[in-house]
Amino acid sequence: MRAYWFDNLPGDQREPHDSGRDVDPKKLAELGILHFNYPSVDDVNKVAADRGYKNRDEIAISPTTLPGYEEKVKMFFNEHLHEDEEIRYIVDGGGYFDVRGKDDDWIRIQLDKHDLMIMPAGIYHRFTTDEKNYTKAMRLFKDDPKWTPLTRGAETDTNQFRKEYLKERDG
Ligand code: KMT
Ligand code: NI
């Protein structure tokens, strides 16, 4: 895992967009993001059990394994929030999650094999594969997942989960 400020320059979303300015992992914690590297799936199972996650699936995001790859990758990159936390475990390959920092600038989080990330409900984010076009990820679900991605807009800005997230983040 490495986190850095997104460069905001034009170019394919899958390019690194590396500004060269790293983001301290402590800063991610302040945003409510947890990160681990778990080579053993036993540790993933433990996190899932501790947090009450009962279901999971695995998605192989690549041009040969995901029908409509190019459109789906563009959809994942649509800025959104969820009304529940999001847990992703990288089984193979890698990818980028971009999250909004406190000043609303993008932080790019580069995840590699065996990285597990937990994002809080209400955080604005987006996902993309990298230039290798291959992310195999485990998605963990609670029984009743509030899963719909809600695209950022006037409505999400006043969403209850968004407001709770900001209260938690900013005190
Ligand atoms: C998301 O929330 O954008 C996704 O679940 C993307 C696919 S999992 C890496
Ligand atoms: Ni999401």
Image (spheres, grey):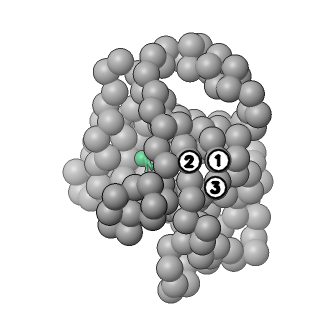
Amino acid type at image mark 2: Lys
Which residue is denoted by mark 1 in the rendering? 92
Quarter of the rendering occupied by the C terminus: top right
Q: Residues within 10 Å of mark 1 (few under 14, many from 20)?
A: some
Tell me the distance, in whole angstroms, between the alpha carbons under discs 3 and 1.
7 Å
Residue at x 54% of width, y 78% of height: 8
Image height check: is 148 above or below 21?
Answer: above
Which residue is denoted by mark 3 in the rendering? 94
Q: Earlier in the sequence, mark 1 or mark 2?
A: 1
Residue at x 65% of width, y 16% of height: 46
Amino acid type at image mark 3: Gly
Residue 80 appears in the rendering: yes
**Is disc 2 placed on a helix, strand or loop?**
strand
Amino acid type at image mark 1: Asp
**Is disc 1 placed on a helix, strand or loop?**
strand
Picture coordinates of residue 88 (x, y %)? 55, 39
Do the residues bearing badges 1 and 2 touch, measured as CB atoms within 8 Å? yes
**Is disc 3 placed on a helix, strand or loop?**
loop
Residue at x 32% of width, y 63% of height: 68
Image height check: is 71 above or below 1?
Answer: below
3 or 1: mark nearer the eye? 1
Q: Is residue 157 left or right of residue 166?
A: left
Picture coordinates of residue 161 (x, y %)? 35, 36
Mark number, residue 136: 2
Judged from this view, the residue extending furthest toward the bottom is 10
Q: Residues within 10 Å of mark 3 (few under 14, many from 20)?
A: many
